[in-house]
Image: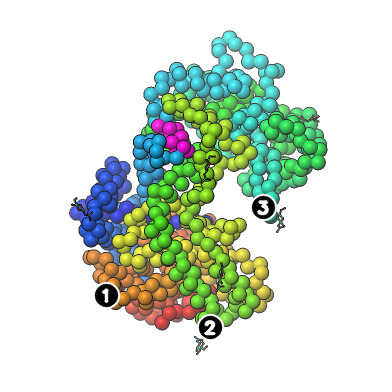
Amino acid sequence: MRRVWFGALSAALLSLCLSCVAGHLLSLPELDTQIQLQEQLISQHNDSAYVQRVMRLAKSAEMRSYMQPQLDACEDFFAYSCGNWPKINPAHAAQPRETNYQQLLANGYRHKQQRLLEQPADEDSDDLAVLKLKQLYASCLRYRQTPLPLYRQQLQEIAAAFGRMPALALPGQLWPAEAFDWLATVAQIKGTYGLDILLLLQQAPELQNQTRRRLYVGQPPRSAVEAPHEVAAQLEQHLGLEASLARQTAQQIVELESLLAKGMSSRPLGVLTEQRSPAELANAYAPTFNLTHYVELVLQRPLQPDELLYEHVDSYQAHLLVVLAQTPPQALANYIFHKLLQHFYYDRSAPVVARCMDSATQLFPELLTNMAYRQYGAASTLDDIDAVWQQIKRSFYNLLEHSNSTEWLSLDTRRLVLDQVNATRLLVNGYAHLNFTERYKSLELKPHDFLFNLGAVLSQRSALEPPAVVPTGPAYDPLENQVLLPVALLQPNFLWSRFYPRALRYGSLGTIMAEQLAHSLDTRDAWDAATLAEFGKRKSCYRHQYERLRYAGNYLPSSELQDNNMADNAAIQLAYLGYRRYLANLATTALTTEQLPSLSHSPEQLFFISYAQLWCNDANEQFRDKQSLLLTGTPNALRVQGALANLADFARVFGCARESPMNPEQRCLLYGKSVN
Ligand SMILES: *[C@@H]1O[C@H](CO)[C@@H](O)[C@H](O)[C@H]1NC(C)=O
Ligand SMILES: *[C@@H]1O[C@H](CO)[C@@H](O)[C@H](O)[C@H]1NC(C)=O
Ligand SMILES: *[C@@H]1O[C@H](CO)[C@@H](O)[C@H](O)[C@H]1NC(C)=O
Ligand SMILES: *[C@@H]1O[C@H](CO)[C@@H](O)[C@H](O)[C@H]1NC(C)=O
Ligand SMILES: *[C@@H]1O[C@H](CO)[C@@H](O)[C@H](O)[C@H]1NC(C)=O
Ligand SMILES: *[C@@H]1O[C@H](CO)[C@@H](O)[C@H](O)[C@H]1NC(C)=O
């Protein structure tokens, strides 16, 4: 349902390149600063006719730079629209193995967030939480100047709160193994910083009924096993271990880590779960460890005898018994302390801005998103986006209600679908409902001490709640029945600008929203049997069509999972219908605003090009082979080809000859009929 999607390119960037044309300059980082300056200058200009002209020229240059207009749009529309992309943003043998629009959009967004964090703190206009986040970020930037001995001493102090790390014992000093209680140590770390080492404890919704919450105890999330030389380098660099001790300790740590990983499942919380009473949890792994004791240590209260807990992956706990029996306490302790301190390691040689942006994003994901939302989510922007959304919903509604090619939906099911479409809401995911001042009111930070601040933020978070994750792509949330758009999409001059033709807004933003709206109908439990049978026929049309498409020389694997392909098809159809309705209400004199300078394409053609260009990408050979064999999703090029070939209007708009690849005789259609 959520796929890797797209990104976009700042128009201001292109305005710089109006003269340079050779787009490969675009990926140079030093250009970013220039672009931002340029963007500032242009947007501060008060002559809107001038701004409009520049913006439209820039967008036209951007769109043209990706195209290969000498190709036949009716043969391969993806190559026609995106053929030049690989020259501008080439994928590499190593990283990045794929380049796409999404990355460009994400980079632009990150730069904007960085600028927001670097704006001087303003006691009058910034709210208290924002001041704290800026303080954290500034302390991170400054921390690079902390002398190495002081940094190492701070790490030692963080560890010392929980006992002693054997590798840090002074020469000749004994590490008292009998005084080490691993279960109490991980429980104390969990209680202080919320970190799940060796065991997990988490409050989370029940899988079947998300309104009910449960307390899960058991296997921590599975993570990649580290390379021994990397761990050794960390121990040397951050803790000052002598090289041979670092190597030896790293070896121990990695061996234990890979041993643990063998018993781990990557299934989500709640899938492999067993309901347990405190008595059962106390006895299950006795005498080696007592999970009830662990939970009570973290919660700092006794469990009631009838309190229910949920054990996550009991086979992992059984595996842990075996691992513990063969692991010396020193190795276990080194592992635990390394896992703890890793959250505090500060690589002084790494690029400092990137490092501190990572911390800000990980520690304050919602607040940072909210800052961008408040900067870019002006009421007029949100209104413009909402207008597209409403138009698309109305188009869908009319299609279902009036078209005789949706007669395959029984009256009852059609009613269900209509109600579902009507009830689905759009939300730009900016966390406007959260009171951050309240949330961070007890957080106290220090201006220069980043490690202290890091610890303060971690310990201020609820130990039982997993860290928040802000979705980076659009998504449909069935629980709230809403389509979520990421704030990154609000960046002006990417997909959206009040100066661009609406064709672009409908072709990009519109298809993105329509796709998620289509996904709101993926749950078909309540459909009647006859309708489901008809649906099955339509779905198999898509299955046969897509398995005849070839990628990197191979046919796509046949798949029963067609929801994404069908949502692609519905999306382009609905956005197109919405755009047609918009055009129909537009005075003919206003039609010129629906074109772009230096592009001879009609408004409707621009609509289709902007859709295709959302999916421009380049992938290296290995990446392509992997994708065509495993197929995590339909490759971008075929998503565009498949969905547009099914839309008769596309063939009409581009005047495609009958039987050309983009105008096939056989089409698959789920909802509705063509406009003309
Ligand atoms: C635009 O800016 C110029 C000076 O840069 C100023 O004289 C003029 O009044 C401004 N116009 C508007 C409409 O703000
Ligand atoms: C989900 O749980 C809540 C609270 O326990 C309950 O009221 C509701 O009926 C449950 N819903 C379903 C679908 O079981
Ligand atoms: C487990 O821990 C609980 C609470 O700390 C304690 O009451 C119980 O006796 C322990 N059970 C075993 C089998 O050790
Ligand atoms: C749709 O229905 C109308 C009358 O309700 C009919 O005249 C028309 O032929 C139908 N169109 C198709 C494509 O079936
Ligand atoms: C759509 O939903 C609104 C309430 O959210 C309701 O007032 C309206 O009548 C519905 N429209 C249709 C056509 O069902
Ligand atoms: C947010 O919380 C603060 C501090 O608890 C409170 O003073 C303020 O009124 C709250 N703001 C809103 C909008 O509720």
**Mark 2–mark 3 distance (CA, rounded to whole Å):** 40 Å
Residue at image coords 54%, 78%: 401
Question: Mark 1 to mark 2: distance in Å?
Answer: 34 Å
Q: Quadrant of residue 119?
A: top left
Look at discs 1 and 2 and give the one toward the viewer.
1
Quickly name the residue at label 2.
404
In this orientation, does residue 629 appear? no
Labels 2 & 3 near each other (Cβ < 8 A):
no
Q: Is residue 496 rendered to the left or right of residue 574? A: left
Q: Residues within 10 Å of mark 1 (few under 14, many from 20)?
A: few
Tell me which residue sits at (43%, 45%) in the image. 371
Ligand 4 closer than 8 Å to the CB at disc 2?
Answer: yes
- Segment colored magenta: 128-138
Residue occupied by mark 3: 211
- Is 542 a magenta residue? no
User: Could you tell me which secondary element the residue under label 2 belongs to?
Assistant: helix
Q: Residue at x 74, y 34 (%)?
A: 291
How packed is label 2: few (under 14 Cα within 10 Å), some, or many (20 or more)? few
- Image coords of residue 578 (percent x, y): 43, 71
Considering depth in this image, is 94 or 114 the residue closer to the camera? 114
**What amino acid type should be assigned to the residue bearing mark 1?**
Thr
Q: Amino acid at mark 2?
A: Asn
Residue 351 x/y as whole percent: 37, 33
Of 429 and 527, nearer the camera is 429
Q: Which residue is mark 1?
A: 589
Most common SS among magenta residues: helix
Quarter holding the C terminus? bottom left
Disc nearest the viewer among 2 and 3: 3
Residue 133 magenta-highlighted:
yes
The residue located at (40%, 75%) in the rendering is: 581
Q: Earlier in the sequence, mark 2 or mark 3?
A: 3
Q: From the viewer's perspective, tell me whether residue 585 is left or right of residue 361.
A: left
